[in-house]
Amino acid sequence: ITDRNSLVVTSSLILPMMFFYTLLAVSKICSSKESGRPLVITSKKFLNHKFGGYHPECPERISVCSKILQEMKEANHICIQEPDDSYRMQDISLSVIKNVHEPSYVEKVSTLCSRGARHLSAWDEDTYINKYSFNQTLLTQAAWLTGVDHVIKNRGMAFSLSRPPGHHASYRDSMGFCLFNFAVGAAHYAINHHGLERIGIIDFDVHYGNGIADLVKSNPKIRYTSIHETGIFPTGRGGVEEKGDFNNILNNPIKYGTKFNTYEPLLTEKSIPFIKEFNPSLVIVCAGYDALSSDELSNVLLQPDDYRKISEHLKQAFGDAILFGLEGGYSLQDLPAAVQSTLLPFI
C-alpha cells in the first residue's frame, strides 16, 4: 500500500502524542453522568498493538485525535474516561469474546501473542499481532462494554476510541486488521448482561462488516445494516441478496466515487428506517472513517463534516443513547476532524 499521508513515528506526531498523555493523565476525574456530555473512552494502552513498520492500522490513529479531544474536553464539551482495566473487567471481556468466537481460536490468539508472533496465519498477513495485542483486545472490548453501560444507564452518547478494529473478524478467523468482533461482543453483552431484547447495529465503515453479518445473521435479536463500497475488500460480500435468516441484515452497496449527496439518502431512507422499525433497545454504530476522500483504502469521497450530518440523522432518529466504536479510518490527516464531527451533534 502506498501511503501519501505517511506519518508513522515522525516528528509531526510528537506533539499529538504529548497531548494524548496529558489528556489521559486527568481523564479519570471526568464523569459525564451528571453533565450529559458525550463520553469518549480511550487509553494510551491502545498504542501498544503495533506492526513495527508501516501499516495503515497504526497507533497514530488514536494519538492524532488527542489535540482535538483535549480542546473539546477543556471547553466542557466532552468527558474522557479510561476503560476499566481491572482483573474483573478483563475476565468479563474475555468471557464476552469467547461467547462470540470459537474458544480455541481465542486461545490461539492468546498463545501466539504471548510468543511474540507477528501473524496468526500465513493466509492473513494483513492482520498483525505482537506481544501486547491480546491484552489490548481485552481492553478494547472493555471500552466497548463501558460504552454499553454508559448508554444504558445514563442515556447519553458514548464513543469507544479504541483499536484494533473488529468488524471483519469471524467466528474462528482474523481478517482485515481485525482479531475479535467488538461490536458483536457489545451486542451480546447488552443482551446477556443487561437483558435487552433488540439491538441495532449501523456500520458506516467503507468496507463491509462481513464478520458482523456472519455472526448475527441467525440471531433474531440483532439487526445489522451497512453502507459500504462495492468491489473492494472483502470481495464478493455485502450484496443486497444477503438478508440474514430473519431478514435482519440490510446492505447498501455504493460505487466508486460516491459523494455524500448520494450516500445520505441511503442512510436516511434505508439504513435508519430498517433499524428504527425494529424498535431497538440499543443502537451500536461501527464508526469507520475510511470513506473519507483522503483515505487510500477506498474510493468514496466523503468529507470530515459529512460525519456531523450522519450523527445529526442518527440523533434525530434514536436520540443521544447511541454507542459509537472506532472501526477503520486510516487518513491521519482527516481522521481527527471526522471524529470531532461525529461528536459535535451530541454536545
Image (tube, rainbow, N blue to C red):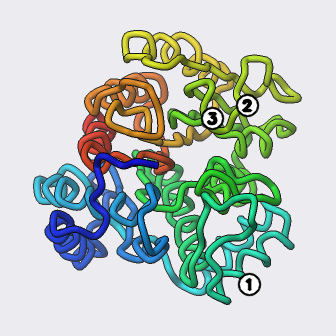
Comparing 204 with 154, the one in front is 204
Give amino acid for label 1: Thr
Q: Quadrant of residue 80?
A: bottom left
Q: Quadrant of residue 203?
A: top right
Q: In the rendered image, which residue does mark 3 sit on?
A: 208
Distance from the alpha carbon under mark 1 to that under mark 3: 29 Å
Residue drawn at the location 21% of the way across and 66% of the way down: 13
Indicate the position of residue 200 as horizontal and vertical percent values.
Answer: 63, 35
Label disc, if present, on residue 111 of the rendered structure? 1
Q: Quadrant of residue 186?
A: bottom right
Dot 3: element: loop
Give amino acid for label 3: Tyr
Give amino acid for label 2: Arg
Residue drawn at the location 74% of the way across and 84% of the way down: 111
In the current view of this chain or complex, which residue is farthest to the front?
Answer: 2
Q: In the rendered image, which residue does mark 2 sit on?
A: 237
Residue drawn at the location 43% of the way across and 39% of the way down: 290
Left or right position of 159 against 128: left
